[in-house]
Amino acid sequence: MSSFILLIHCPDKAGIISKVTSFIFNRKGNIVYIDQYVDVENSIFVMRLECEFLDATNIDSLKQAFSEELAVPYQMFWRIYSAEAKLRMGIFVSKYDHCLYDLLGRHKAGELPVDIPLIISNHEYLRSTAEKFDIPFYHVPITKNNKPEAEKRHLELLRQEKIDFFVLARYMQIIPDGLIEAYPNRIINIHHSFLPAFAGAKPYHSAYKRGVKIIGATSHYVTAQLDEGPIIEQDITRISHTHSIKDLILKGRDLEKVVLARAIKLHIDRKTLVYNNKTIVFI
Amino acid sequence: MSSFILLIHCPDKAGIISKVTSFIFNRKGNIVYIDQYVDVENSIFVMRLECEFLDATNIDSLKQAFSEELAVPYQMFWRIYSAEAKLRMGIFVSKYDHCLYDLLGRHKAGELPVDIPLIISNHEYLRSTAEKFDIPFYHVPITKNNKPEAEKRHLELLRQEKIDFFVLARYMQIIPDGLIEAYPNRIINIHHSFLPAFAGAKPYHSAYKRGVKIIGATSHYVTAQLDEGPIIEQDITRISHTHSIKDLILKGRDLEKVVLARAIKLHIDRKTLVYNNKTIVFI
Amino acid sequence: MSSFILLIHCPDKAGIISKVTSFIFNRKGNIVYIDQYVDVENSIFVMRLECEFLDATNIDSLKQAFSEELAVPYQMFWRIYSAEAKLRMGIFVSKYDHCLYDLLGRHKAGELPVDIPLIISNHEYLRSTAEKFDIPFYHVPITKNNKPEAEKRHLELLRQEKIDFFVLARYMQIIPDGLIEAYPNRIINIHHSFLPAFAGAKPYHSAYKRGVKIIGATSHYVTAQLDEGPIIEQDITRISHTHSIKDLILKGRDLEKVVLARAIKLHIDRKTLVYNNKTIVFI
Amino acid sequence: MSSFILLIHCPDKAGIISKVTSFIFNRKGNIVYIDQYVDVENSIFVMRLECEFLDATNIDSLKQAFSEELAVPYQMFWRIYSAEAKLRMGIFVSKYDHCLYDLLGRHKAGELPVDIPLIISNHEYLRSTAEKFDIPFYHVPITKNNKPEAEKRHLELLRQEKIDFFVLARYMQIIPDGLIEAYPNRIINIHHSFLPAFAGAKPYHSAYKRGVKIIGATSHYVTAQLDEGPIIEQDITRISHTHSIKDLILKGRDLEKVVLARAIKLHIDRKTLVYNNKTIVFI
């Protein structure tokens, strides 16, 4: 048996669902999940579909047929993924270790079905944590003057390890445009505020100063605009005047861990689709 | 233009989605919403679909065609509703008025697109509230000895006013089996606990005694088993040891109001479907 | 028996709690609630205390003694309130009626122990709602040119009805500085976003555009800086890409109602205390 | 400087707060936190107080004085703890590793200021995880016939390592009464349901069967009545009909981790106090 995941967005038109489902049915495939949405404002049709074929259907011939019969006539932006393929995930860290411990613990506990071939850091600080979990650790220091070299080294490592997407697990450096362009909608960041509130540095300090009663965390795809990429997941927790900035930082850690892990899981399961700087999240 | 909502459940089989969507497409209908789910454990296929036809498609001929071409061959349990039809909702109350004020306020504010032709109560107590909102109020007292007469009077009033479904807005009497059978999955109750915890009487007292840190409310369809009907919606709120039973009751009121209102809205929008004592809630 | 509520903030010093509790004890009072907090950053001590005296203790002589023995030596900002006194609350509305229905329903249902002697609106639109609940309604139109006259009329009405504080229940006009100065920390607004995100006009439109996964509402005291006053209460609800702006507006209504009602309740119960543009909320 | 935490419960009487705060003040101590609560129903006074002394105040002489001057006359149940003392925490596990990874990750990341001198398990399965984090691992198998020996071995290990309290991190064996009596209110369990709903085995299966819309997790002190001990913390997450039992288990893991960690933190910070099978949680 072979399983596939299909993601589409295209100009909305009558009959698309019928055409796509017939396409699967005619090849003796069974649809096990379908979810669609019409963005009425922009007249865009969006769909996610999971299907199974009893025989070992070839993904390349499926793609070819889909392209000719449907994608071209309907001007679709589309992807077909094998449901079994395991993604290769990179992790970027600096000194904060709570998200890293959380991700590695989840990986060991079987919650994140990916390979993790590398951890990259601008500090030596977390090497021993990486080694505890038997994951290769690469120290790529970043200074005022070595940014182009560091970017080159990052790209080299990511390519060498065939990384599909990577995660900024509280990585405290700006990602340069070149890297973003090489991994569009494939870099996942966790920001420690309820975006768009408190974008930028030191959000817990700003939240404390403003006297908010709730703090949050936001996971988003990284774009060239800092903290403005398409949001994948957010969550919040209540605070009160009794909490110091240190308390906010501590309470926020649990949010950061959970929100980042959920966003990664959605990405792995091919449940996200980005257009117009928004993330469609299929559930 | 005419709009319809289609709800289906049937034994799972390959090709159902393709068949149903083609059925709509072939009649020049456009699908504006589709959501499906396969209950793998029981091998049951469930679907909700909204479609539009540019012409004034006749609902009866549509039903006839659907029945012949799809429902019979696929052994479907199914419903086709006109999306424009306004439901007629009854309200049962006793003495608590918070849910009643909330529902009537929402109705006036345009949030609940139904007609409300009657409020039935076992007390005179809330007549003036009903009159404030210009809704006919019927006092049907209930005593140890008049239960069969009261049930008869209820049925009479519900039929006379062509009630489609009714809501127990903190109505403090058991609904007799005859009434439940006459309105299967069409009686919505609000229970003031997080079911199945604290079923039965005085749940806030029990929650207080147990020292829980969170209380809840549950809206469900009424079945012959008290507080065991299919759950439509639940929500919770945090409490602490500082809250007395009176505080729980007060905090719970907001939960009851919101949870009941959400459940009613889901029912009105034809977003619920019941089988095996569970409510599928399409979103 | 007489009950009082005491609110204090002052420079932090050792021994304040002991001094204040002894002051009550020496007058044969019993403390039934005490909560304090030290703002370490600013070295400010904050306290709320409820106490009971078996005899009919005179509030004025209590205030006099407190002032001499404690408030002056410790440089306290302080208030002593009779716990029995009923506040007089005004309501300002425009055309949106959901918060108004909610507040009036709660008032009728006994949840808000205040008198409501007036509703002021810049439109005639909600007069019948006010009358349904037997509350005097005053239409004070606002145009580009009559703002000083409108403000004068507002002040006149508020004073005539001895209003203690008033609530902007989705009132769509800016409150002029004169009115704010006359009612410092006594004007409660509900803003339909999770402040500081989406301050200003049309927050649901902005939230939709940004693609957030959670929306919120914020109740705050009104200051001269629009949407920047001290926050009393906030809450949130999850949304998804499937929700249109209209859906956000609808979902947001329940948030606005609940958040505003909670903030009002905290104010009525004398559980809020403002300094440095933050609201201490005792629970 | 020396810091202490004081926990009290006793029959309610006028003047207790004043007496206790004067006791601290007269010894030149400064109160940095005070929270009290009167259980009106049972007429019980409860208090938590943190205080600092500039000199190296001796805890034993403080206890002696407190006992004579206050605890005896007011019939107090009381504890005075040094705020600096580090507790020694044991962990019991079986085969599930997600809570264990979470706790050990938090410990490494500095979130749990305790010593962890031992991990005990009825399986060999998680030895390598314990070793990864350099924590001694003891395998104490449990069979139908060796229960008394296993209990003896547990007690021996706990005493040998001077364990102050221990945590059942999804430990799948019943704790015998002897062990519970030796560690009253010092054994913390995580139950994977929103107690009292779904007590006992396989709560996710029961939640699935009942069709609830929200699942939860509960951390509580262990008593002789299974799943009926005083609740420390609870939390919930939304589910829908689309989630299989496997999904519930996966979603529940995050709840279990966070709820257990919060309960442990409250215990470590001496913020819990138990009486009448309820946990007072100071915040």
Image (cartoon, coloured by chain):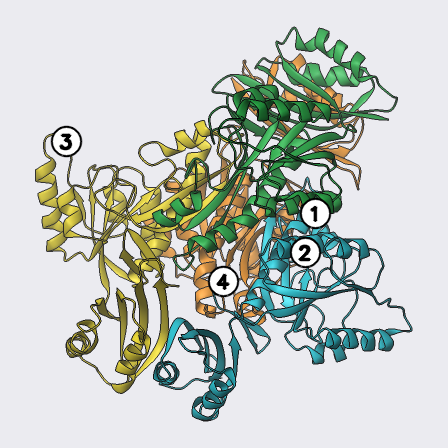
Chain colours: A orange, B green, C cyan, D yellow
Marks 3 and 2, Cα distance to the nearest angstrom?
A: 64 Å
Q: Are marks 2 and 1 on the same chain?
A: no
Above or below A149: residue D176: above
| Residue at the (37%, 55%) spot, across then down | D262
Q: Are marks 2 and 1 in contact (CB under 8 Å)?
A: yes
Left or right for B85, reference C221: right
Label 2 is placed on what type of residue? Leu
Label 1 is placed on what type of residue? Gly
Left or right for B35, reference D49: right
Label 4 is placed on what type of residue? Ile
| Quarter of the figure that contains the C terminus of chain B | top right
The residue closer to the viewer here, B120 or D66, is B120
Marks 3 and 4, Cα distance to the nearest angstrom?
A: 46 Å
The residue closer to the viewer here, C36 or B246, is B246
The residue closer to the viewer here, A195 or A183, is A195
Marks 1 and 4, Cα distance to the nearest angstrom?
A: 32 Å
Marks 2 and 1, Cα distance to the nearest angstrom?
A: 9 Å
Q: Which residue is mark 2?
A: C104
Marks 4 and 2, Cα distance to the nearest angstrom?
A: 30 Å
Q: Which residue is mark 1?
A: B105
Q: Which mark is residue B158?
A: none
Q: Residue furthest right?
A: C145
Chain letter for the residue marked with disc 4 in the picture: A
Of circles 1 and 3, the one toward us is 1
Q: Which residue is mark 3?
A: D143
Q: Are marks 1 and 3 in contact (CB under 8 Å)?
A: no
Residue B58 spot, x, y in % from top left: 83, 17
